[in-house]
Amino acid sequence: MNINIILFNNFETLDIFGPIEILGQIKDYQIHYYSEAGGVITNAQNLKVVTEPISSADESGILVIPGGMGTRELINNTSFLNKLKSIAEKSTYCLSVCTGSAVLARCGVLKNKKATSNKQALEWVKSVSDQVNWVKKARWVADGKYYTSSGISAGIDMTLDFISDRFGKDKAIKIANDIEYIWNDDCTNDIFAG
Amino acid sequence: MNINIILFNNFETLDIFGPIEILGQIKDYQIHYYSEAGGVITNAQNLKVVTEPISSADESGILVIPGGMGTRELINNTSFLNKLKSIAEKSTYCLSVCTGSAVLARCGVLKNKKATSNKQALEWVKSVSDQVNWVKKARWVADGKYYTSSGISAGIDMTLDFISDRFGKDKAIKIANDIEYIWNDDCTNDIFAG
């Protein structure tokens, strides 16, 4: 199974590397990093990551998209959104962290679905699309193949839940223990909402 | 203030990107990424990060080193250890996550200091140096300018404590809230020990 990580300039660091740490514990998952044109992607923490062009992605597999300030530009990039929509629709599962859900929403793939996002950015996220059932209080939300999480570190909790759904809760607990992470495993317990 | 991140092949993803997320919230901190020879560093999660050669680092500032399976080779790389020792000694502060403390220990800079490491790897870490006062039960340990944490996600808690020590607890709490992270702020509460 391919894990297709979508990066863009000014993505948020922990949004994506929390989930990658967890997904990377599954031996059958092959992680790939894509951006619109490929090449080096840079973010606010001066991190430079080498990516492949999104046109070269095998569109099946698991799509993962982070948030970050870069999403403010991304939601106006029509050619990128068209490609992302195609991948999201063909993917087996689709995970977003923080304002990554705004990008998925703008693609139209979250229409009439429940989803959440960063709580400090929620008003902006809602303004991007009013066709999503935005959940104001949730650490993360799963609706069918779409998993969306709240801000930044919430992606870690969501990805452990995704692993639990795929491989059983014992596997998720083992991974949490191996990475010495105290898993907040109740998606309704969102202390950062409101 | 420079943040000097030390990378090597097969570093552990979340070890370093948890602390970077937090350190990146401080506007005066300029983050740089170094490896022995510079160029692209790859890890087990297929991540490719662009780095500068360690010889070009300004040795003052804050040194941060992750763990990961790559540390098993690193502790036998004498030229790298000599350079790392020089940077560690000249740094204002020095932070390690997981088995990163084994590398610092092999450099000799943790001699007679209290330090900790990944709990599943602690026997190996102790075998690297018996001149360190290894703490078996601690989420992280601060001894002078050296902050060492337990495994992987423990680096997030440690770095928030580092911020608390530098800028006050309110600042650390604000960052934790901004990244929607439930901070485990008691370094003695280590549920993964033993």
Image (tube, coloured by chain):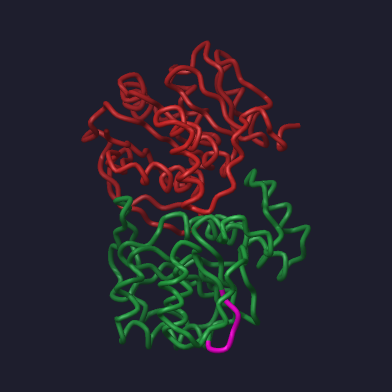
Chain colours: A green, B red
> What quarter of the picture does the N terminus of chain B occupy?
top left
**Above or below — where is A87 with respect to A38?**
below
Residue B123 appears in the rendering: no
Residue A113 inside the magenta-drawn segment: yes
Could you tell me residue A68's position as x and y percent?
39, 63
Looking at the image, residue A52 lies above or below residue B65: below
Residue appearing at x 50%, y 60% in the figure? A151
Q: How many marks?
A: 0
Q: Residue at x 59, y 81 (%)?
A: A92
Range of residues picked out in magenta? A111-115
Q: Is residue B185 visible?
A: yes
Above or below, B81 relative to A65: above
| Residue B47 drawn above or below residue B95 | below
In percent of width and height, residue A184 lies at 67, 54
Q: Judge by depth and name the residue closer to the eye, B107 or A79.
A: A79
- Which quadrant of the figure has residue A73? bottom left
